[in-house]
Image (cartoon, rainbow, N blue to C red):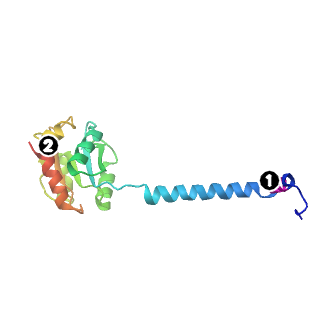
Amino acid sequence: MLKGNTAREKWQYFKDYYLKTTLVIGAAIVFGIYILYTTVFAYKSPVLTVFVISSEEPDCNGLEQKLEEFLDVDYVAVEWMSQDSTNLSSVLPTRFAAGDIDLMIAPDEIYKQYAQEGAMEDVDGVSVQTSKVLRSYLSDTDSLVIGVVKNSNDVDEKRETFNYLIQQ
């Protein structure tokens, strides 16, 4: 059918019948590769996650960098949630169950509530008020305590980080 046609006529035939389909399939392949890359290869799981509950937002980036230096790793996550947040009581149990919080810094009454429920390694948290490291990144250290979450995988590494953070 196209044997006797010129290159220009063959190109026009391709454009009329196959160009749109070829472009859609090409775009779908590129999109599929992008999704595969971002879900499989690009996600980095944090080596350590510190969850801070306080009335004022801490310097999360600064504390992350300090902990990355101390642990000599690429990715540490420091996350903040206001102690006045209405969804705090649903977020924390979910995060504890998922096992993605390693250390928690919170007001004493919130810490004790979860410690009594068995979420923390120690029933009593350690005050962060005397910590040289944490005072640099947290503004309201008066009522805050720190502790290791019970469902952490590498408890020794978490304890080492905990001891580093509470040093005076």
Q: Where is residue 71 in the image (x, y as percent from the top left)?
A: 22, 51
14 magenta-colored: yes
Specify which label sits upstream in the sequence, 1 or 2. 1
* Circles 1, 2 touching at the beta carbon (< 8 Å): no
From what the image shows, is residue 44 above or below residue 165?
below
Name which quarter of the figure residue 29 lies in: bottom right
Count how many numbered circles sit on residues in the image.
Answer: 2
Question: Residue shown at 21%/59% (left/top)?
Answer: 119
Q: Is residue 120 visible?
A: no
Q: Nearer the viewer, residue 86 or 48?
A: 48
Q: Position of residue 53 (x, y in %)?
A: 25, 44
Q: Distance between the residues labelled 1 and 2?
A: 69 Å
- The residue identified by callout 2 is 128
88 magenta-colored: no
Helix, strand or loop for the magenta stretch, by majority: helix
Q: Inspect the image, locate mark 1, and give the three-letter code of the amino acid beneath it.
A: Lys
Magenta segment: 10-16
Q: Which of 106 and 16 is in front in this view?
A: 16
Q: Label 1 crowding class (10 Å Cα cut-off): few <14, some 14-19, many 20+?
A: few
- The residue identified by callout 1 is 15
Image-based side of 165 in relation to 3, left or right: left
Q: Inspect the image, locate mark 2, and give the three-letter code of the amino acid beneath it.
A: Val
Quadrant (top left, top right, bottom left, bottom right) of the C terminus: top left
Q: Which residue lies furthest to the left in this view?
A: 168
Depth check, mark 1 against mark 2: the one in front is 1
Residue 1: assigned label: none
